[in-house]
Each structure stands twice: as structure tokens, then as C-alpha cells.
Amino acid sequence: MKILASDLTVPETYKLLTGVVVPRPIAWISTLSEAGHVNLAPFSCFTFVSSEPPMIGVSIGGGMRGLKDTPGNMRRTGEFVVNIADDSMIQQVHATSFDFPPDVSEAEKFGLATIPSDIVGCPRLRDVPVSMECRFSTAAKFGQGATEFYVGEVVCFHIRDELYQNGKVHTAQLRPICRIAGPNYATLGPIVTQSAPGHWGPPGAQ
Ligand SMILES: Cc1cc2nc3c(=O)[nH]c(=O)nc-3n(C[C@H](O)[C@H](O)[C@H](O)COP(=O)(O)O)c2cc1C
């Protein structure tokens, strides 16, 4: 099968990309609305873009009512928290993706407890294995659509004690959720370990 990108409509292109760029991790982002509600939504176009300082990014498309709540809150408050759920929370993660008005707190609506963050004003989720407090840094637009790539600097990592050893996170015990195309999710399969070539990441990272 050969497909010229120029022959595809935007929805067809989106379907192909979300089926090919898999599995994706999920940033479950909490932000504060103008009225002080904790907004919560999942974003799987998520990666890190720097480790000096730690910076992460998510690609956020246009919403039904214009700008989605999350990027609006990030820009207004300059802060957000990326929470990482485990595979026992797939249902709640999915439920918080539905389009609720800005005055509805998805965290409250779905009974997800929040606690104050240490540095940023936006609360984090209490019962997730990892949260990263972030300061909004920059947003960059790519292509013709409404999508923008939002980048933030991580100022504090919260990692459940039993998952953290010698500066590393125990991936199998983290049990991350893997997003695949559409409303489909997967869990982590077997982990296959190879010898490290010694030149990955910054010096001293191995
Ligand atoms: C698992 C999952 C991953 C998602 N990833 C993205 C994403 O990367 N970018 C995006 O714009 N929307 C993504 N969405 C859709 C948003 O979660 C959805 O538009 C949400 O209503 C945004 O909420 P907000 O308006 O409170 O920011 C995803 C939905 C699900 C279920």
C-alpha cells in the first residue's frame, strides 16, 4: 500500500498518524480555570523535549468551542501539572476527555482527589504514581490547522516511593497506559532488555 499524503483529507491523515505513531503515553493534565476549578484532560501527543532543564511538550488541537480549556488555562496561569495514570485508571482517563464547560471540574465530577502542588498553584492528582509540576514556557504552531505544541518546564517531580530506585523509575511497576488509535488503549507488554551502547542521553545518564 502506498498513499500520497497530498491525496488525503485532514481526518484521513489524522486517522493514519494516530494509528502509526503508537503506542503513545498519556499526559493527564490538570490546570486551574479562571474561577478556580481544577480542569483535567488527557493528551497523548506527549513527549519530553529537553533534560537541561527538564521540559515536556504536548500537541493540542482546536476544541469545539475554540481553544480547549487546558491550553487557555496554561496560558493564563502560566502553570500546569502533568499527571501519569496507571492502567487501573483507563476508564477515568477516558471519561475526562469529554468536552465539559470550563466551570465543570472533571476531577470533581469523576471523584478524583486532588492535593496542592509544592511549587505551582495548580493542584495535582493524589492517587497517581507520578505527577510533574510545570511552568508554561512556550507554544509553537505547525501546519495550517489550529494545533499548537505547548511546552513547559518541569519544576518538581512527584514519584510514588516504591517506584523510584537509584534515580530510575521502575517501568513495570508504573504500569503506564498506552494509547493507540481512537478510543483504544493497551497496557505494557513484556520488557525486552538489550545491552546499552553507552551513547544515549546526556553524559552520565546510563
Ligand atoms: C487518551 C486521549 C488522548 C488525547 N490526546 C489528545 C492530544 O494529544 N491532543 C488533543 O488536542 N486532544 C487530545 N485528546 C482530546 C482531549 O482530551 C479533549 O479534547 C478534552 O476535552 C480537552 O479538554 P479541555 O477542553 O478541558 O482542555 C485526547 C483524548 C483522549 C481520550
Image: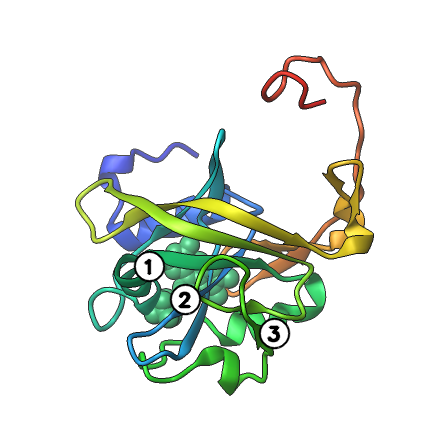
Callout 2 touching callout 1 (CB < 8 Å): yes
Callout 2 touching callout 3 (CB < 8 Å): no
Q: Nearer the viewer, residue 183 or 87?
A: 87
Select label 1 or label 3 by which is in front: 1
The amino acid type found where label 1 is placed reads Met
Instruction: Please give the label number shown on residue 74.
Output: 1
> With 37 as the anchor, is 90 left or right in this view?
right
User: How dense is the environment of label 3, judged by Cα within 10 Å: few (below 14), some, or many (20 and up)?
Assistant: few
Instruction: Please give the label number shown on residue 91.
Output: 3
Query: On screen, 109 above or below 40?
Result: below
How far apart are labels 2 and 1 at the CA level?
7 Å
Look at 55% across and 83% down and name the residue there.
Answer: 110
Q: Position of residue 197 (x, y in %)?
A: 71, 13
Give the residue number, with chain letter if any, for mark 2: 31
The amino acid type found where label 2 is placed reads Thr
Q: Mark 1 or mark 3, which has the lower sequence index? A: 1
Quarter of image, res 72? bottom left
Q: Position of residue 46 (x, y in %)?
A: 47, 47
Q: Is residue 182 visible?
A: no
How far apart are labels 1 and 3 at the CA level?
25 Å
Tell me the element at label 1: helix
Q: Is residue 51 visible?
A: yes
Q: Mark 2 or mark 1, which has the lower sequence index? A: 2
Question: Does the closest atom of ligand 1 sit within 8 Å of the Cβ of label 2?
Answer: yes
The amino acid type found where label 3 is placed reads Gln
How far apart are labels 2 and 3 at the CA level?
20 Å
Taking the image in four quarters, ligand 1 sits in the one at bottom left
User: How dense is the environment of label 2, judged by Cα within 10 Å: few (below 14), some, or many (20 and up)?
Assistant: many
